[in-house]
Amino acid sequence: MGRPREFDIDQALERAMRVFWARGYEGASLAELTGVMGITKTSMYAAFGNKEQLFRKALERYGAGPAAYVTRALEESDARAVALAFLCGAVCATTPPGGPSGCLTVQGALASSDEGRAVRDLLVDWRNAAGVHLEERFRRAVDEGDLPSGADPRRLARFIMTTAFGIAVQAANGLGPAELEEIVDTAMLGWPA
Amino acid sequence: MGRPREFDIDQALERAMRVFWARGYEGASLAELTGVMGITKTSMYAAFGNKEQLFRKALERYGAGPAAYVTRALEESDARAVALAFLCGAVCATTPPGGPSGCLTVQGALASSDEGRAVRDLLVDWRNAAGVHLEERFRRAVDEGDLPSGADPRRLARFIMTTAFGIAVQAANGLGPAELEEIVDTAMLGWPA
DNA sequence: AGAGTTCAGTACCGAACGGTACTTATCTAA
DNA sequence: TTAGATAAGTACCGTTCGGTACTGAACTCT
């Protein structure tokens, strides 16, 4: 009922996500966001609420799209495969052929002014949650025997997360998929047998 | 000649560095910077030029101070000691007792608006330069025999840099020195014998 | 056809941004 | 003591920031 919206809300959100990805939360101005989204500010506010809520929606979309490898990797059959799928997923996600380099959850707001604190905290939680999921998966792996009983799931999870974060920074530095894959291989050399 | 400045320019720069460290380049406003520096905007402009040049000076200071471990680690006697000193230095630098968590060269401007592009590029160069220094040191290590002749210096350097970047993000996530040290130990497990 | 509802666009809000003229104060050199 | 030079402080510059009234336009339901 009422006038139907003239733009594709899904496409607009996808484009907003990419702007946040490339610019970070505070570096993305409403002018650029709405310009790339192809809508006016009023349409954006009507559809998403405000800038912060637009970012939250964009982050959700990021988790379900480019960062879906986080969840997918957990479903691999053994711990080594999980770790490898996680890191390779990170490589692909941080070097998309037609998109921004790096990781939205890292460069979205690593440091920020006070205005960005809420978003920064949101991203800290997001990143830490990914680590917890990995830790729980490795804990299960110890129970199931595909990690030695002496292995420390939390420690391994933190190491994999650290490598993934480092890959995100290296992607922002300009490294390509092939070079990042080498890093993954090197990181996996110390993995428990 | 002329009226002498009434503030300690070294102390002011130190404080500016910490603000940039905590807020990032674009997240640090002139109001907050000068407020923490204890001087007015005019004094800042007279002493440093503008915001970007202030950042460049702050980055120099960071390299000579908190990030001096980068240079110091290269002077260790063998490759393994270099790598270990580098990563342990990163842990200490990213978790200073009274300072901001993380690394200025990472969270200074990973993603930014167009206005911050110059600083972002500067930081990309800074980070890549560190990797090159490490690579050259490992190349020498191969020559000197404390790395196996089959070892790939560039690959090892990139891995260590990646781990250091990851540590910087983990520090921003709230991890403490003890937890980060565990990550260092885990990363070094795959180091060539 | 008319009423009610929702969307799009323009024009604008106060606040904060980085940066600067201009005045006043404090020093050195002659 | 005076002239020249530099610093500090105030008040302001134009621009951009995120966010919002308000006016029309486009739809559905009765």
Image (tube, coloured by chain):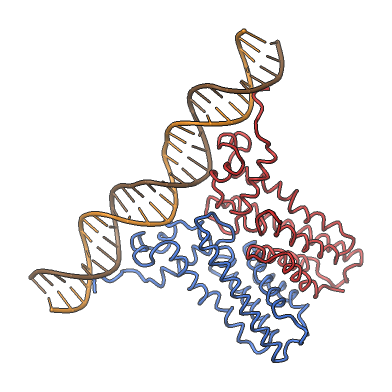
Chain colours: A red, B blue, C orange, D brown
Q: Position of residue A185 (x, y in %)?
A: 79, 71
**Front residue (pair A88, D19):** A88
Q: Residue furthest front?
A: A98
Left/right of residue B61 with respect to residue D7 in the rendered view: right
Q: Residue furthest right?
A: A145
Quadrant of the drawing holding the N terminus of chain A: top right
Residue at the spot 74% in from the left edge and 62% down from the top edge: A91
Q: Position of residue B101 (x, y in %)?
A: 58, 65
Above/below status of A101 relative to D23: below
Above/below status of A10 relative to D27: below
Left/right of residue C30 with respect to residue B83 in the rendered view: left
Q: Position of residue C19 (x, y in %)?
A: 38, 57
Residue at the spot 69% in from the left edge and 71% down from the top edge: B163
Q: Position of residue A150 (x, y in %)?
A: 85, 73
Left/right of residue B184 with respect to residue B6 in the rendered view: right
Quadrant of the drawing holding the C terminus of chain A: bottom right
Quadrant in the picture for residue A140: bottom right
Q: Residue furthest bottom?
A: B144
Residue at the spot 48% in from the left edge and 58% down from the top edge: B28
Above/below status of A104 relative to A139: above
Quadrant in the picture for residue A191: bottom right
Left/right of residue A77 with respect to residue B114 in the rendered view: right
Residue at the spot 60% in from the left edge and 74% down from the top edge: B92
Count of numbered marks? 0
